[in-house]
Image (cartoon, rainbow, N blue to C red):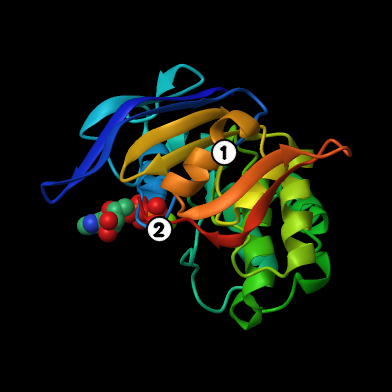
């Protein structure tokens, strides 16, 4: 399903955080949202999964304004994997993943065989089926992140929103997680910290700086040496290598001079 963010502005407590931000993600596309700390990436995601209401502009999912939908319909369509997602204490991995069914069910509905099948399938895809009976709180950060992704898949969402999903993961697990998201093929907007990982994984990138979009488009067009220097403060180039993979290579003196 297509996501269109149109001229979204956010002010919190009178302080402007986002200014006229627009971006779109085509059905099945994987778009990366990048920018320095404090540039407004998480805030933009919040306007999409309905945790912060924009002070201007619209967020359309499949052409429908997500802020006009019922909370339940919106919750069914969009799954978010966030940093430090709160989960009730004492739940097993299976129970946490099964929470992804919640928006599809009535308050007193029991887990059906079909629900269980989706949960088992999602835990299998994220490599966490062997942990199903473990207490979620006893897992490592990386393992928790996989369970949260499993919960998002259990939801069978139209849109996946990820906020720095690879943060606690070791290098192999980072690649595995992003490959998995690609395989799932759901429309995805992901905040990624690691620019090289973003460059090689994403179809397109949108770059935020101080609450404004400063570049958007295919990776090579968005992540230019100028953007890397002006926005991220590093000397680097983005190139497509002979194997077809786009990589970011940092300079011998990686700190760009302040202009
Ligand atoms: P990013 O995810 O890119 O690091 P955030 O969206 O978290 O950035 O934050 C963008 C800016 O908005 C920061 O300056 C942050 O301090 C501010 N901000 C975010 N949430 C709030 C809030 N609830 N109250 C006040 N300021 C906030
Ligand atoms: Mg953030």
Tag 2, which secondary structure? loop
Q: Does the residue tagged 2 have its C-beta within 8 Å of any atom of ligand 1?
A: yes
Evaluate whether residue 76 shows in this view.
no
Residue bearing mark 2: 37
Q: Residue at x 89, y 39 (%)?
A: 243
Residue 126, above or below 225: below
Question: Residue 153's x, y, as percent?
Answer: 67, 47
Q: Label 2 vs label 1: CA separation?
A: 17 Å
Q: Nearer the viewer, residue 170 or 147?
A: 170
Earlier residue among tags 2 and 1: 2
Question: Left or right: 26 with respect to 63?
Answer: right
Question: Left or right: 191 with respect to 46?
Answer: right
Which residue occupies the extreme right position in the image?
Answer: 243
Question: Left or right: 239 with respect to 77?
Answer: right
Q: Nearer the viewer, residue 167 or 227?
A: 227
Which residue occupies the extreme top position in the image?
Answer: 63
Tag 1, which secondary structure? loop
Ligand 2 placement by image quarter: bottom left
Q: Which mark is residue 223?
A: 1
Q: Does the residue tagged 1 have its C-beta within 8 Å of any atom of ligand 1?
A: no
For disc 1, the neighbor class at 10 Å (few under 14, some 14 to 19, many from 20) is many
For disc 2, the neighbor class at 10 Å (few under 14, some 14 to 19, many from 20) is few
Q: How many marks?
A: 2
Q: Nearer the viewer, mark 2 or mark 1?
A: 1
């Amino acid at each position: 399903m297509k996501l269109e963010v149109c001229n979204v502005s956010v002010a919190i407590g009178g302080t402007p955080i986002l200014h006229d931000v627009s971006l779109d993600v085509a059905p099945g596309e994987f778009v990366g949202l990048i920018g320095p700390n404090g540039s407004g990436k998480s805030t933009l995601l919040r306007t999409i999964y309905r945790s912060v209401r924009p002070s201007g502009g619209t967020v359309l999912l499949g052409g429908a304004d997500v802020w006009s939908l019922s909370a339940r319909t919106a919750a069914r369509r969009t799954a978010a994997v966030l940093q430090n997602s709160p989960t009730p204490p004492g739940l097993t991995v299976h129970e946490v993943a099964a929470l992804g069914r919640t928006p599809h069910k009535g308050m007193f509905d029991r887990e059906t065989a079909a629900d269980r099948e989706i949960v088992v399938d999602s835990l299998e895809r994220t490599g966490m089926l062997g942990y199903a009976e473990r207490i979620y709180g006893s897992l490592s950060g990386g393992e928790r992140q996989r369970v949260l992704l499993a919960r998002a898949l259990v939801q069978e969402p139209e849109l996946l929103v990820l906020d720095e999903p690879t943060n606690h993961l070791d290098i192999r697990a980072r690649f595995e997680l992003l490959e998995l998201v690609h395989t799932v093929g759901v429309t995805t907007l992901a905040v990624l910290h690691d620019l090289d990982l973003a460059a090689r994984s994403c179809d397109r990138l949108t770059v935020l700086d101080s609450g404004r979009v400063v570049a958007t488009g295919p990776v090579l067009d968005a992540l230019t040496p100028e953007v890397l220097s002006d926005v991220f403060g590093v000397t680097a180039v983005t190139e497509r290598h002979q194997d077809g993979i786009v990589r970011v290579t940092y300079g011998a003196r990686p700190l760009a001079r302040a202009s």
